[in-house]
Image (tube, grey):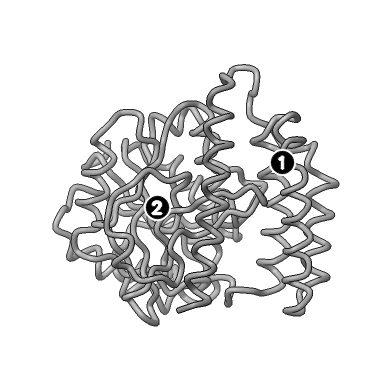
Amino acid sequence: MPNHDAVIIIPNFNGLRFLPSCIGALEKQTCRDFDLLVVENGSTDGSAEWLHAHGVPCLVNHENLGFAGGVNAGIRATTQEYVILLNNDTVPAPEFVERLLGAIKRHRRIFSVSAKMLCVQDPSLVDDAGDGISLFGWAYQRGRELPAALYERPSDIFSSCAGAAVYRRSLLEETGLFDETHFAYLEDIDLCWRARLLGYFNRYEPGACVVHYGSATSGSRYNSFKVRLSSRNHIWLMYKNQPAWQLMLNAPWLLAGLLIKGMFFRKRGFGTEWLSGTLEGLRTAKGEQQADFARIPLYRFLAIEWEMVLGTAEYISQYVKREKG
């Protein structure tokens, strides 16, 4: 039986250099009503040995199951109602747990709550204030590289960023866990989209704050591995969560989004990886499990469609602000 009603699950793959500061910050939390589990995902840098030496509860996978497979293993190995997922390359503020749990307990239909993630290079700037979705099919980080002072109010969001968020287990049993075929990237958007289709919602809580290094596992913001997987998963994300009529309605925007992304990655030297991932996504999409569209009322699709319209405007607005900044 768990000692507490919350568990923090940290997936780790070759993140030894980050573990002391991340776990050290958890020892300073104002709320101690949580258990801790590190999912050791086949690291070769001595992470497992360090965790054992310091008495940190650990679930050892002997191969890298990716983010989705790793955190799913951690969720299945625990029973607490509130599941906090935390990237190993974060340093949470002392009120992190207290504010996340307080926010998700405010309403039984809250599926998840996303923390405020700040850039380690400049903590006055946002790394992620929850995630949005646009008509282009692009998921985006709200507030990325914009002043944190602009994101000080709690709000509804399309999706939580699983790098620092809390989920309600009883609702995860209804939505299902993260799609392990994604391996990494966009699996959190996919999960929260499913929750939205089922009538639940996601929140952003700025009082729960972490400093985030970013892309610590993959190595950089843009790299061959990340571009290929995110391009493939982007196709799956659209196919799995939009019925045929909605895909047709959004087709001009989605095609424009693909064209723009292709040009973007080609300019940065990742055109081949983008094309490979996109073609794989198109070729294999029908093998992915779609949401059960028949049980979802029309108004929920329309609500999400409107949110995609607003998300497009927000994405463009953020881009303009960054360019001016």
The quadrant in which the C terminus is found is: bottom left
- Judge whether 277 appears above or below 167 on screen: below
- Residue, disc 2: 85
Amino acid marked by disc 2: Leu
What is the x, y in percent for residue 171? 42, 30
- The answer to which image quadrant residue 273 occupies is bottom right
- Judge whether 233 appears above or below 221 on screen: above
Q: Which residue is at 32% across, 75% downward?
A: 124
Q: Which residue is at 70% across, 59% downward?
A: 229
Of marks 1 and 2, the one in the foreground: 1
CB under 8 Å between callouts 1 and 2? no
In the image shown, does 255 or 283 lie closer to the viewer?
255
**What's the mark number on residue 250?**
1
Q: Is residue 164 left or right of residue 306?
A: left
Secondary structure type for disc 1: helix
Task: Determine the residue located farthest toward the bottom in the rendered image.
Answer: 121
Q: Earlier in the sequence, mark 1 or mark 2?
A: 2
Amino acid marked by disc 1: Asn
Q: Which residue is at 24% across, 66% downward?
A: 93
